[in-house]
Image (cartoon, grey):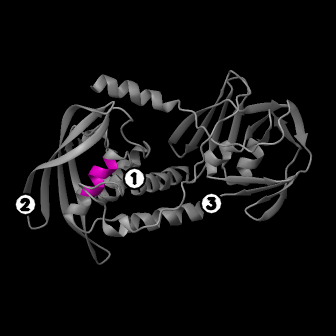
Amino acid sequence: MKLMRIIISSLIIGTVLLASSMDVEATDKKTLCNKQFELNGEIKEFPESLPIIKGRILFPLTWLAKEMGADSVVWDGKSKTVTVEIPAYFKQHQYLSYLNGIKYGKESKEYPLPKRLQDLEILPYPLTSGNNAIFSQKPITLNITDKGFSMPWAVYDYEVVKGKLYVTSDWFNTMFLAHTNRVGNKIKINYPTRAEIQKKVADLEMLTQPTSPEEALALWIVGQQKRSGALQYSALSPELKQKFLAKKQGWVTGGSSPSAGRATIVNKEQVDDSTIRYVIHIDEMLQGNISGQITETIEVKKYELEGKTYWLIVGAKGDTGYYSILPEENN
């Protein structure tokens, strides 16, 4: 089972995001001569006319990414690799993990999320999905980084014009959650700023803090079932949160197969007035069938933080390395 987990996890790394592009009248190659556009409501101008290939508008990656807040963009034409350093990209993925976890966590009947999360109106998921055009059979590699956190992507919808790299609007959605609209020759690009992303994450972190042992356990279990590292993170003690953040390993846990299925509490022990220890069994699902079972021991402790009482996980041991956001030494 461990070998299968490693193989499946490794396949996820090279996943290509399929995102909807801006379509124009399909011709082989032409250019959009109107350089003026709106970026978050501000009128700007592209440095060159935009190429249009197979009906898709392409945008200058280096120039536009820096306009949208990238610290650096390095294009290596020899290795066909572009590295984009984006502050708050790690936070952005935490935000997406919260949205996924809360949206699909509402389906949980055995270990329901807290009512305040059940009643929360979730915004539309900001990553788009569709079909990318393929301009070249040989992809380039896009590495999106943020202070040690790195996520690689294979990009087929690109063009190099006079040494400059152009990509479709899909990749600005991937990098910045940007949405691009075109009416006639006018282009509008809107995206959440770094401050806005940080505010959204801070609000969700506060909202998801568990106020009872049952809430902490529900966040932990649903977080594993729905592959939401953010929900798991909300249930952790400050000490364990710091250990996770030090690893910069990302917010998606486990894989599509095997996956965490039904969870059952097999033992509950009151260690002392402020500590409860749970032993849970989780079914492992493989292609829709139960393929095995794992055991986790979860210890939850009462915390007083900023004048409020929370119950947070101080230990998670057992076979949690695949499904958990915690580093291996904690398991």
Instruction: Give above or below for 118 relative to 83.
Output: below
- Residue type at mark 2 is Gln
Instruction: Give above or below for 102 relative to 328.
Output: below
Query: Quadrant of residue 49 in the image?
Result: top right
Query: Split into 4 quadrants, where in the image is the N terminus?
Result: top left
Residue range in magenta is 218-224
Q: Is residue 245 left or right of residue 313?
A: right
User: Observer-nearest residue: 227 or 91?
Assistant: 227
User: Observer-nearest residue: 143 or 24?
Assistant: 24
Is label 3 or label 1 in front?
Answer: 1
- What kind of element bears circle 3? loop
Q: Residue at x 58, y 49 (%)?
A: 127
Rounded to the nearest angstrom, the CA distance separating label 2 from label 1 is: 31 Å
Instruction: Give above or below for 183 relative to 82.
Output: below
- Residue type at mark 1 is Tyr
Q: Is residue 63 left or right of residue 109?
A: right
What mark, if any, has residue 104 been given in the picture?
Answer: 1
Query: Split into 4 quadrants, where in the image is the C terminus?
Result: top left
Q: Are marks 3 and 1 in contact (CB under 8 Å)?
A: no
Q: Are marks 2 and 1 in contact (CB under 8 Å)?
A: no
Q: Position of residue 9 (x, y in %)?
A: 40, 30
Q: Residue at x 86, y 33 (%)?
A: 27
Residue tagged 3: 192
Q: Is residue 269 left or right of residue 249?
A: left
Q: Residue at x 53, y 38 (%)?
A: 151
Q: Residues within 10 Å of mark 1 (few under 14, many from 20)?
A: some
- What kind of element bears circle 1? helix
Q: Residues within 10 Å of mark 2 (few under 14, many from 20)?
A: few
Rounded to the nearest angstrom, the CA distance separating label 2 from label 3 is: 45 Å
Q: Position of residue 311 (x, y in %)?
A: 23, 65
Residue tagged 2: 270
